[in-house]
Amino acid sequence: MNDAPAGAVRTSALVALIGNPNTGKTTLFNHLTGLRQKIANYPGVTVEKKSGPLRRAPAGCAVEILDLPGAYSLSARSLDERIAVDVLSGVGHRRPDLVVCVVDATNLRRNLFLASQVADLGLPLVLVLNQVDAARKQGLRFDLDRLEAQLGVPVVPTVAKRGEGVDALIDAIHRALREPRRMAPIAWPEAVLEARSRLRAVTPGLTDGDATRLLFDSGGAVARRVATNGGGLEAAIREGREALFKAGLNPGPAEAVLHYAHLDGLLEATIEEGGAMGPAHTESIDRLLLHRCWGTAVFLGVMWAVFQSVYTWSGPLMDGIEALTGRAQALVAPGLAGTPTLQSLVVDGILGGVGGVVVFLPQIFLLFFWIGLLEDTGYMARAAFLMDRLFGWCGLNGKSFVPLLSSYACAIPGVMAARTMEDPKARLTTILMAPFMSCSARLPVYVLLIGAFIEPVSGAAVAGWVLFAMHFVGLAVSLPLAWFFNRVLLRVEPLPFILEMPPYRAPRWRDLLWRMWERGQEFLLRAGTVILAFSVIIWALLYFPRGESLAARETAALIAETAAAAGVAPAEIEARLADGDSELVAALAHRIEGAQVEQSYLGRFGKTVQPLFAPAGFDWKITVSILSSFPAREVIIATLGIIYRLGPEIDEESGSLRERMAAERWAAGPRAGMPVFTIPVVLAIMVFFALCLQCGATVAVIRRELDWRWAAAAFAGMTLLAWIGAVVTYQFGARWFA
Amino acid sequence: MTLNQLRVGQAGRVLSVAPDSPSATLLAALGLLPGTRVLIERLAPLGDPISIRFNGQEFSLRRQDAREVVVQREGPER
Ligand SMILES: Nc1nc2c(ncn2[C@@H]2O[C@H](COP(=O)(O)OP(=O)(O)O)[C@@H](O)[C@H]2O)c(=O)[nH]1
């Protein structure tokens, strides 16, 4: 073990902070480290690793505080708990010199179970008795001296919410680093000791603590770590558990039974219950909030507010950011006019890309504000309770609701919101489903196509219904898909969905805002860079190669066409153009822009792959527009504008774009002369948009939250699905409307 | 009978829990041990999950997880 001998001088120390969920661990961590925390991921997994230097370290010794994921026990199988066990055993990491275990004073016995398990791993402890204010209110009194003497480790009472006791805790950490103390060891029965030594005999290097975990927790972290060591171990575990059974101990709950018996002995005469009741207000609030009708109504109201804030209330802020981006672009552009390529790179590629990242911040901030509020007050657990049934059947759980709902505004905060889910499989499913929800960027496409082609034919009522129905295409496709993968193909055993209903509490605004800020910052730094790279790449694909003779050719064509149409001499048009006739100049610019896109790498690619999209009824212009909108789907409107020579500054309500599209005819092929945009084609385009992951930012966030393989799989899978959807829609539609 | 068979408002005492069941092991870690008294607090609007109270704490769990816990029905608290 790497304990320094008592009194020896250390130069660095690692202190792990552990505790049940909702005990105030995060609040305490913020107090211990100030605001100098580092957030990273544990290697290979997406569990957040938070650490920071102790605010007031002993002289000559750097103390690092590592915040472990909240857990009830070391024996459950979620990723969080596995990481806690690995860190505490010093796997892939320096072994902590000291563990600070935060316990909730209002529920001491249950909280100590985790401490007792940690102690059994052989680590020295400091116990933080947090929320003593709440405990006092409930009439609980602690004999701290006796508690310390019985447990054998320092006990520091705190009120993390108000920063009380933090200085005493830091002192206690200093002292414990000098003189580590371990908790009174549990007296394991003979059967456990025997099984343990048998396990150690077949597995070299196994500690007693690890052997205990292995014995009671056969699918847990230690089992995973030593799984490769061959069959002898498995037999030894099985024999050990059988021996426990023979000794009258059911190996399932045995560990808990023994620890609790041990704790009951240690806790004797340390807590005095003053007879006051538990948090009674919680029960009366729950009678309303978990009521079959009223509870559901309140839930819908709360979710409406969450959705509105992300969907609508963030609008002005997003518009402001877009305006600022435009302002910055206009400001920079003239300075770079001498170097057109650099100008386009900076203005369209970089500034446009940065703007495209920053524009998501208001939604992320607002959503995480709500999530923080719902979690801090204790309502999130209730919401999950109300909704679990609706989602459980396909491998999700009640906690999927908020991420999926917010994905209707934007998948990016939605994917990030899935962090509130402990079950990794359910979280994975939720993240992969999020981009199927009909986000706000799909709306302009629906509005354009429905407004241009469905409303004139079928009337406003039908148009409204089609728009409504489009919002559920993604959900209708992804739910059965989730069910199929989770329940049929992989037969995933759902993790137990056991959720504490914490007492209702007033939120801590400062912590809440801080967490919201953290999320935004993280998005900017980690996803932002990837999004920026995407946007520069797509810019290059649309900008290069430059058509050298384009301008001359388009000028000549414009002059000839305009002259013919107006019945005047070409020289006259040429003169008007030279005079700077604004209408002609704009028309020329749009023509050149359109021609440039057509012969850019992306344009050529689109023309090449058009046959692939022909079964969906798409011509090359639609194909190029769709390809160009892979980084961000709303871009399609601008691309359509460019391709139809109207310039990029049009929007989905634009009458001229609708006219141009309606007038578009097939130039050649079997349908030559027929309109391109028929109802089946329009529906196929919309289905394609509903199902496709055309959003570089979402791909980047999925990569960040899962890994690049999942991001690539989601992208490829959804593209394929979108293609299938579009083809099926068109083929059915073409027969139906024929 | 098992925990999921109790009705809302009914209480039971835990007799035993299934070995090798992750949900039963987690419940045991939370203090739901043989001998513990447990009360069915309420049902979710769609009948599942249920919420239970024991040792002064409330948890929500799915019926399928509650099946892993064998209880004996008890009268109301004296
Ligand atoms: N009454 C009381 N509430 C606290 C105390 N410390 C934290 N809380 C509240 O407990 C909730 C959970 O705190 P948090 O730090 O997020 O806990 P974690 O889940 O363990 O990280 C928050 O609403 C805090 O404001 C305390 O000492 N007393």
Image: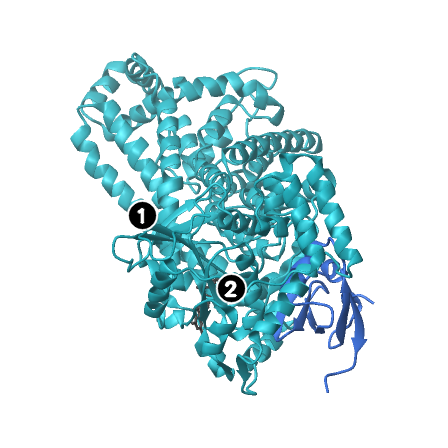
Instruction: Tell me, by letter, which chain the rendering colours blue.
Output: B
The amino acid marked with disc number 2 is: Met
Mark 2 = which residue? A183
In the depicted view, which residue is nearer to us: A553 or A372? A372
- Which quarter of the frame holds ligand 1? bottom left
Mark 1 = which residue? A321
Q: Is residue A487 above or below residue A175?
A: above
- Figure colour scheme: by chain
Point out the tag, 2 or 1, that comes first from the N-terminus. 2
Instruction: Identify which residue is drawn at 76% across, 58% down.
Output: B18
Where in the figure is residue A255, as x and y percent of width and height? 66, 59
Label 1 packing within 10 angstroms: few (<14), some (14-19), many (20+): some
The amino acid marked with disc number 1 is: Ile
Chain A appears what colour?
A: cyan
Where in the figure is residue A198, as x and y percent of width and height? 68, 46
Quick check: marks 2 and 1 in contact, CB under 8 Å? Answer: no
Q: Tell me, yes or no, if residue A281 can be seen here.
A: yes
Residue A305 falls left or right of residue B60: left
